[in-house]
Amino acid sequence: MRTGLEVAAASGFSMMRGLRVGAICNPTSVDRDFNHLADLLAAAEGVTLAALFGPEHGIRGAAQDMIHVDGGARDPRTGVVVHSLYGPTFESLQPTPEMLEGLDALVFDVQDVGARYYTFVYTMALAMRAAGRAGLRFFVLDRPNPIDGIHVEGNAVRPPFRSFVGMYDLPNRHGMTAGELALLFNELHPHQERCLLHVVRCEGWDRTAEWDATGLPWIPPSPNMPTVDTARVYPGMCMLEGTNLSEGRGTTRPFELWGAPFLDPDALAERLRREDLPGVAFRPAWFEPTFHKHARQMCGGVMLHVTDREAFHPVRTGVACLLAARELGGDAFRWRTEEYEYRSDVPAIDLLAGNDELRKGIDAGRSLDELCASWPEELARFLPLRERHLLYEE
């Protein structure tokens, strides 16, 4: 199996010869021998690497979530200017005409994790729109979906709740690669913002394959995505960011380990077991985050252990966790009210859920089945659109 980067590099980046390119990249932009895209492009005959663009967490991947990334410096290895695509305003999320001046093409090579909240694919989409307006070519060096390209789960994002964690009507778990999403996004963009898109496909990837079957090393795409096990639970557990619950940041197992000082681990685990969720076990746990929510406070919670990857439903499991925490936490449980991903007019949980019905339903004490009841109908609308842009067979 070869990633899009490895396929492009094997040809000497022939599709980019004669072009001045800007690369959107981070620490995952490497081949299996850990050669970085920027270094490979800088050394490629006939290709001029003219700029680097850093998404959320920066090109070195060191910044924490929702921390603005600085630009304007020069990369010490290649000597080219580094532009930030994650600054203090929503407008800072896409390249400006000044950043694109003198370029012929943009190249995107960042590992996605298969959940609609992960911002890298929206950085890609905004850069595609900027490239379309400027008449630049846009190359996506595709990579496998690490939690497989088969399973799709969740609900769509309604227009009032679109944000940088949900710019398009994707379900929480979309089952697509970045290259496939790029094809979908380009179709949805206004005609004047459609770019000259070329997806360099992976070779030898079966979309049913789990990450460990690819032979690729796992490189954390962001500071709190340390393992592929994190990615597996993330489509559901990321929704905890919309609450005052610790989603495990500041521990060694973020998103798998979660809780709060006001929760009892044994009661929480027992409450979740009653939902009879497939493919997952809940272990009572105590933990003390070193930073982020409830830093240096003892938290009671549970750790998720995925026992059957095929049967596991991460989004339904995430909703069940919210429901249990709201029920057992009482008045101590709160929905996040601070600004979240550049929006302060809508609660964070509504941006993550894609609507306000989940929050209202949980507050009203609706059952898990009731909270998930709309998903089949919403998925039925999404699946034909998805099908048109799939590049890989099962």
Image (cartoon, rainbow, N blue to C red):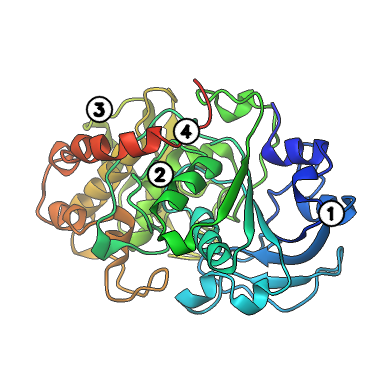
Is 168 on the left or on the right of 270, as rendered?
A: right
Q: Amino acid at mark 4?
A: Leu
Q: Tag 3, which secondary structure?
A: loop
Residue 233, image x, y percentages: 44, 40
Q: Amino acid at mark 3?
A: Asp
Instruction: Classify mark 2: residues with Cα within 10 Å, few (<14), some (14-19) or many (20+).
Output: many
Instruction: Classify mark 3: residues with Cα within 10 Å, few (<14), some (14-19) or many (20+).
Output: few
Between circles 2 and 3, the one closer to the viewer is 2
Q: Which residue is mark 2?
A: 235
Q: Which residue is mark 3?
A: 276
Between circles 2 and 4, the one closer to the viewer is 4
Residue 306 image-quadrant placement: top left
Circle count: 4
Q: CA distance from mark 4 to mark 3?
A: 33 Å
Q: Tag 4, which secondary structure?
A: loop
Q: Which residue is mark 4?
A: 390
Q: Amino acid at mark 1?
A: Asp
Q: Tag 1, which secondary structure?
A: helix
Instruction: Classify mark 1: residues with Cα within 10 Å, few (<14), some (14-19) or many (20+).
Output: few
Is 311 drawn above or below residue 338 in the view shown?
above
Residue 374, image x, y percentages: 17, 41
Q: Could you tell me if residue 199 is visible in this image? A: yes
Q: CA distance from mark 3 to mark 1?
A: 49 Å
Residue 363 image-quadrant placement: bottom left
Q: Which residue is mark 1?
A: 39
Q: Amino acid at mark 2?
A: Pro
Is 208 drawn above or below residue 331 in the view shown?
above
Q: CA distance from mark 1 to mark 2?
A: 33 Å
Instruction: Classify mark 4: residues with Cα within 10 Å, few (<14), some (14-19) or many (20+).
Output: some
